[in-house]
Structures are given as C-alpha cells and as structure tokens.
Amino acid sequence: MNTINKEELLKSSKWIRFLFMAMYAVLINFIVLPFCIALSFIQFLFVLFASKPNKSIANINEHLIEFFNDTVAFLLFQTEEKPFPFKSNDDDDSLPQEEVIIEGEADIIQDESSEQPNN
C-alpha cells in the first residue's frame, strides 16, 4: 500500500495551482461562457440582417477561443502555463508584420555647379 507523503501534500506550489484552477473554472463557467453565448446571438443577428458576420465580433471570438483553449488545457493538466493574463506573449514575434508604405513626392534640386555662367 502506498504511503502518503506529507511534504508533497503541503507543497505551496500545488495549492497555488489549485487556487488558479478554481479561479479559472469560475471565470470560464460564469463569465466567459455566457459572454460567448451572447456574442453568438449577436453574430447571428448580423448574419440574419447583413448576410455576413461582423469582423469586430469575429476578432473578439478569436481571442475568446484562444483563452478558452489555454484555460481548458491548464485545467486538464495539459500545460503548466497559466492562461491570460499570465501567459507570456513570445508568440507575437512569429506573427507577420504589416508592411508600411510611405508615399511622398521628390523635389528636383538642380546642381548649381553644372550650370555654366553667362559671360
């Protein structure tokens, strides 16, 4: 029969993880999920009346899906990395950067040394 190691039970890192798990479980259940359901109905209204989804809501949806996936992975011990706002944003470097094009007009400047003086 296995004996229970008292030191393992009293490790503060395990209890801190439990507190984060409880916090994220409540957050997902009572805030994020109802918010997602409300956004789905609002998006349905856009599709119903405008025949296309709203891009702003679709952008919010992408962030909610990422948060939901990260949180469920944390709750199910698939990762030790805590979700937003504790998640590191090192992945942002892999995103393509927008190219900035600056337009302007060039002024033509005549070189005075090439002009011949009138005698």
Image (cartoon, rainbow, N blue to C red):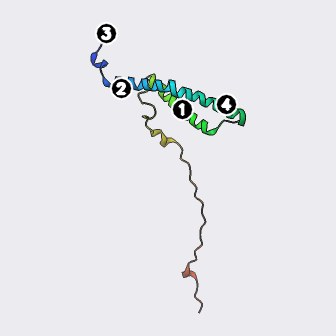
**Disc 1 and disc 2 in contact, CB within 8 angstroms:** no
- Disc with the residue nearer the chain's start (1 vs 2): 2
Q: Residues within 10 Å of mark 1 (few under 14, many from 20)?
A: some
In this figure, which residue is indicated by the disc labeled 4? 44
Asked whether the viewer can see residue 24, the reply is yes
Q: Which mark is residue 64?
A: 1
Residue 83 vs residue 57, the one in the foreground: 57
* Secondary structure found at label 4: helix
Task: Give residue 119's quadrant in the image.
Answer: bottom right
- The amino acid type of the residue labelled 4 equals Phe
Asked if the residue at tag 4 contacts the one at tag 3, i.e. Cβ–Cβ closer than 8 Å, the answer is no
Left or right, 50 with reference to 57: right
User: Which three-letter amino acid code belongs to the residue tagged 2?
Assistant: Ile
User: Tag 3, which secondary structure?
Assistant: loop
Which residue, given by chain and number where applicable, does mark 3 sit on? 2
Mark 2 element type: helix
Amino acid marked by disc 1: Leu
Q: Residues within 10 Å of mark 2 (few under 14, many from 20)?
A: few
Q: Residue reaching furthest left?
A: 7
Seen in the picture, residue 27 relative to 118 is either above or below; the reply is above
Residue under label 2, please give it: 16
Q: CA distance from mark 4 to mark 1?
A: 17 Å
